[in-house]
Amino acid sequence: MLFLAAITVFAQSMKKTQRFQSYFDTYKDMAIEQMKKYHVPASITLAQGVLESGAGDSELARNANNHFGIKCNGWQGRKSYHDDDESGECFRAYNSVKESFEDHSLFLVNGKRYSRLFQLKQTDYKGWAKGLKECGYATSPTYATKLIEIIELYGLHDFDTGKGSSSSGSKSHSNSITVELPSRHVYFFNDNYYVYAHQGDTYSSIGKEMGVPAQKLARYNENVQDARLQEGSVVWLEKKSRKAPKDFADRRHVVRAGESMYDISQAYGIRVKYLYKMNSLSPNYVPLVGDQLKLR
């Protein structure tokens, strides 16, 4: 399985991080749904997902929606090529994160090597973690230990009853807080509120739920009203700021592959024109991987 960004991120998981918690808050319902369909413990799915995908931030997760590092191996769908054990290896690519979660379940259910895991109790996350390592899911000798540590640190085993709920998460910024509504989490950062888009969301559907006219919502997010929203994308509920909070004064955003100035502005709740302005860039500038941008 893929460990490109995940290994570096895991070092942070020995203490709770907002980045990991946000991942669990975003995908816990999806993991519970998969557990009810295929009997793979939700805690295992979430721990594997956060570890394999670097909390959803690995290149494979961002470019191919692949959160579990599953390689092609006879796959007939879209493909994505990345360096892992060897250079340019073939990985499965999905149209949505939900497809990745579904395929992960089917990968385990249909894999003969994993059949003995389904004889374990659904609540036996330790047995599942150790069994995955023994069955060859990953090559890392500490893979099972990492899964168990993540599950216990974040209380993910509560989800294995199909009922639990992890503590409120937030975006990966130290001064963010969260409010929970019946249908989705609402987060607070940079003097603004935001939500994550679910699969099939539009500005109209989110606006109706949040009590914000779709036209305003699109304008706040510097987008057209009928734009297609990708699952997991940030949707701001008020007009974005001119700059990031004060504690970002000495920080820089390092541009990653595939990021646009709009993507970066959405991540920090900054209007695009001010992101260009504070970095003395022309509107025609296209960010390059490794570029460092001021946020305030």
Image (cartoon, grey):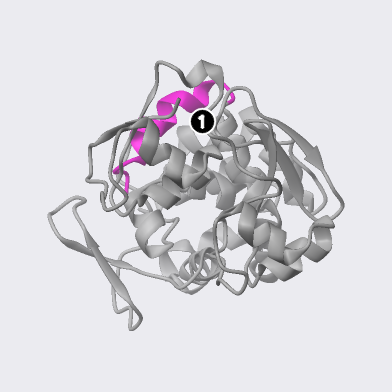
Q: Does 241 sit above or below residue 113?
A: above
- Whole-percent x, y for residue 22 in the image: 61, 40
Q: Can residue 124 be seen in this view?
A: no
- Whole-percent x, y for residue 47 in the image: 54, 44
The amino acid type found where label 1 is placed reads: Lys
Q: Is residue 46 visible?
A: yes
Magenta residue check for 103: no
Residues packed near mark 1 inside 10 Å, few (<14), some (14 to 19) or many (20 plus): many
Q: Residue at x 46, y 51 (%)?
A: 132
- Whole-percent x, y for residue 93 in the image: 37, 69
Residue nearest the observer in this picture, 136 or 98: 98
Q: What element carries label 1?
A: loop
- Location of mark 1 (residue): 243
Which residue is most to the left? 87
**Magenta segment, which residues?**
1-16
Residue nearest the observer in this picture, 181 or 156: 181
- Whole-percent x, y for residue 257 in the image: 28, 50
- In the visual, does 78 lie left or right of 204? left
